[in-house]
Image (cartoon, coloured by chain):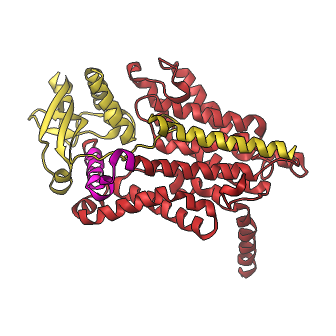
Amino acid sequence: MDRLRTHRWAIATVMVAAAMVTPVVLDRDSFPLSTYPMYARARPAEVTLPAAVAVDGEGDVHRLSLELVGGNDDPLIVAAELRDAIAGGRADRTCAAVASRVEAAGDTVDGHRPVAIEVVTERYDTVDRVLDEADPVARRVHARCPIGDGR
Amino acid sequence: MTRWTRLHPTAPPERLAAVRILSGAYAVGYLAVRSPAILAVRDRDPAAFSGVGVLATLDRPVPDAAVVALLAVTLVAGVAFTVGAAFRVSGPAFAGCFLLVATYRSSWGQLLHFENLPALHLLVLGLAASADAWSLDARRRGRPAPSGHDHAAPLRLLCLMVVLAYVIAGLAKLRYGGLDWITGDALRHHLAYSATRLELLGEAPPPWAATAVANAWALPPLAAASVLVELGAPVALLGGRARDLWVGSAWLLHAGIAALMFVVFPYPLLLVAFAPFFELERLVPLLRSRRMRLGAAAP
């Protein structure tokens, strides 16, 4: 009986090891068997990042909290949702969802009354941004939805 | 079969039970804290759903009520798993439910790699004789654990899973980033990217990120150390000081990532991932004798 149990675990160990290595061989990331590719690729300094922002009557842009952007406190999830919505042509729906959360949260964002929400991609030199607060080198609006006074 | 590791040639049931309690408590706490994010998928656009892993064949989201029910059942099973109640059912049930919950959430566009290892560990713990000691089942039974249960082999397997996960992560950096990941600006750009992404999403960037990005000379050695820790994970299987040194190094790696990127891998940061490497049952008499000494010293 002991011998059988020992062999059972030996077989299980070999199978689990094989299962964990399989995604590496196939170069296919999944869950929970993974190639663990996070932060593994070289990344250029200049990248395009998604965001959802509030715009006030002066045209100034105000950053929204994670909760307002994605209804979630996880930046990885919120960023992925925005990225997928833009890539999947659903930026307008995301914009409307953000707008409803902003409206539900109150009249102002950072003390300013927003007139619209924009779902955007902004291209930054991230090193310059971190060190010198550099402005985006490019900006594209994928969806704009009026709120409050802008409606 | 144990030639590949010096860890746990044999193990008492308490050692495996300690890992069950730690991993179970971690997973229940994790699910409780993350439940808002898990339940938030109910508000997502169904078009964003794409099943992964064991849910790869699922082509549309399940009804909202099913998500709530699954999370509730998982939490209840998790508590039973942790305290070792009806473990023949609660063990596999919690392992399976945790896998389903995590897979379902991951099917919405973002794989959270810090959930992989707990999910895999729970599967082993749930199927092993992890509740032969320090459990409600053992207390009800009122006699020693059934003979013939192997408590060492599951621990060795848990350790192997940790080692493989780190080695694969190290290989990924060399595979996708090449040596340039170590010698070039890859780490600097990742730090800058993470800080910028947080800022654009309305969050404060990590306070040390700017310092690290400004001191580019310091980052290649840090990148080399990261890859060395990941690829060097097999030394932990030697046990003893090699294990202690590697676990300490891996923890520092995660602490550094958390400080510089605000990317938190809670399972290793809380040391739960590394629990299978140690003879945890030895802590109990140590803690007991310390408590007795403190009690005796009290006026």
Q: Give residue B1's position: percent from left, percent from top.
A: 72, 51
Residue A119 vs A124, above or below: the answer is above
Q: B132 or B32: nearer the eye?
A: B132
Q: A151 or A126: nearer the eye?
A: A126
For residue A110, side relative to residue B95 (left or right): left
Q: What span is in magenta?
A: B174-199
**Residue B45 appears anywhere in the view:** yes
Q: Which chain is yellow?
A: A
Q: Give residue A31's position: percent from left, percent from top.
A: 51, 35
Q: Give the residue displayed 59% in from the left and 54% down from the top.
A: B272
State yes or no: residue B183 in magenta: yes
User: Quadrant of the image for the C terminus of chain B?
Assistant: bottom right
Residue B203 vs A19, above or below: the answer is below
Instruction: Name the chief secondary structure element in magenta.
Output: helix
**Residue A100 appears anywhere in the view:** no
Q: Give residue B6's position: percent from left, percent from top.
A: 68, 61
State yes or no: residue A87 in magenta: no
Q: A139 or B203: nearer the eye?
A: A139
Q: Which chain is red?
A: B
